[in-house]
Image (cartoon, helix red, strand yellow):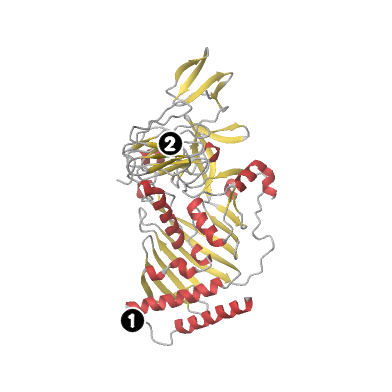
Amino acid sequence: MARQFTRWTSVALAAALSCVLVVPTDAQRGGNRSGGSRSGGSVRQTKAVSNKSANVNRNTNVNRNTNVNANRNVNANVNVNKNVNVNTRGGYYGRPGGTVVKGDEGAVAVGRRGAVAVGEEGAAAVGRGGAVVVGEEGAVGVGRYGRVYGTGEYYEDNDGWKVAAGVATGMAIGAMIARPPATATTVVVSGSNYYYDSGVYYSRVSYGGSVQYQVVAAPVGAVITTLPGGCTTYINGGITYQQCGGTYYQPISGGFRVVAF
Amino acid sequence: MRKSGVSKSLVTVLLGSVMAAGCSSDPSTPEEKKAKAETLLKAMSASLAGAKTLTVDTVETRDRVRAGGQKTVENSTRTIAIRRPDGAYYRITSDLRDTEAWYDGKRLTLAMHKDKAWARGPMPGTLDAALDFMATEYAINMPSADLFYSNPYESYDPVASKGGWVGRETIDGATCHHLSFEATEVNWELWLADTPQALPCRIKIVYKNDEGSPASQLTFKNWNLAPTLAADAFTAKVDEGYERLYMVRAPTAEPVDDATTEKTAAAGDAAKKQ
């Protein structure tokens, strides 16, 4: 079913900022199989987007024997089973430094600075300086600066996303919403504004000609006053941290600072 | 050379208009209806392709399908300016947004006034490629874009579509030919003025493969095929104090030279003044 997120693509993705992705396999609701929203374009533009989607999905149903597991540490690892060959000489699309992972029935590209994970029936393409993860019917891209890009999918608010994704809490990195939660607070890191609410960080981006709020990995250096729920204690080098999902916080005076290891 | 090109365009327009004006009775068979639609489209295409610069205003409605299938409609107005082969500008205004866009042959700059934000990304060097790029890379859709390619007739590709001339209708007091076609991705209707130039009166596009089959409809006003545009009409003007945002690009299998993005990103606020 088009709007049921019955399957999740397990991914391991090392992008520039080392974020871990969990990609809904049907990130493109509404019949937009991948490659961006079609609605609203001209006749030719719609065809161009459709053709592009076909190109992106040309490896669909390949690499059935590839298993990639998410590694929630900072640096993700890609585990490829014995039926997969790895060609390290060049990118699938000719990009320097990229690699090609070939399965029994096709190939998957791995980006210069990131990796691409493939689900049971998913395939992937690589963008310059990043990677694209494509699920069964959807796609999420990782671009330069380590950002994770949705493919035109966005939601009015995080509640809308939860309904669509069929989950109770949390949002996938790369998901975009039209406006941040009402309770979000502004967090400034290195001069950049982020919006924080309940363990989720958002960054304002331009997509589709309008402003969207995109879920991003916790920016190192961000300071919050209250930890989200479900955190556990983590000790490293004799220092006690709080681990909240994949984010580590160091207690400081008046709050908690995002750190990376 | 230029004079010859203009003459050829004029001849095409005149021939098309004579045929379109109906030296004979209205078509009755599917073949005749398709032939008449193609003739009208060619006349329109020649008019628009022959304009080195043009301006037009549109009144647009666009369906948006939300989670759960709920459909809402965004009403907007848009002002468009085109300079062939490498300049475009639009400003779209609605309850949701007030956005200006400048394409200068190298970059696309967006100023999103309601959000006091701006963004910039690299673009191909020609308008045809730029219009494709906007849709495929930046997911910026403009339902009227077909009219601004160098060959609008080819953009609509009526030969590969099913349909044709439907009849005459009055739109904003003007008589317009109604064409209707079904293509693979969309169904589209176009109303062309019953004049020699056959300029578009209205467009309706139904995205039938998308959930809820959303539609876009535009009504055109104030066509000007020879406007005098300011020298800096396609130079971005971003207000001081606007926050610069990253221009998110949809996944692509094609390599893109985004050196411009790197430069402007590095330049920070100074880039606004470029």
Above or below for B45 versus A141: below
Residue carrying label 2: A172
A6 left or right, relative to B14: left
Query: SS at mark 2?
Result: loop
Dot 1 alpha-carbon crowd within 10 angstroms: few under 14, some 14 to 19, many 20 or more: few
Amino acid found under the numbered disc labelled 2: Ala
Residue A212 seen in the current view = yes
> What residue occupies the far left of the structure in this picture?
A1
Output the chain of dot 2.
A
B271 left or right, relative to A18: right
Distance, label 1 to label 2, CA atoms, is 56 Å
Q: Position of residue A105 (x, y in %)?
A: 33, 44
Does mark 2 fall on the same chain as mark 1?
Answer: no
Output the chain of dot 1.
B
Above or below for B105 versus A228: below
Query: SS at mark 1?
Result: loop
Q: Position of residue A44 (x, y in %)?
A: 45, 62
Q: Position of residue A121 (x, y in %)?
A: 33, 42
Residue A38 seen in the current view = no
Above or below for B178 versus A106: below
The quarter holding residue A232 reads top left
Dot 2 alpha-carbon crowd within 10 angstroms: few under 14, some 14 to 19, many 20 or more: many
Amino acid found under the numbered disc labelled 1: Ser
> What residue occupies the far top of the structure in this picture?
A238
Number of disc labels: 2
**Residue at the spot x=50%, y=72% of the render?**
B45
- B266 or B187, which lies in front? B266
As drawn, the label of residue A92 is none
Residue carrying label 1: B28
Q: Position of residue A200 (x, y in %)?
A: 48, 32
Confirm or deny contact between disc 1 and disc 2 (CB under 8 A).
no
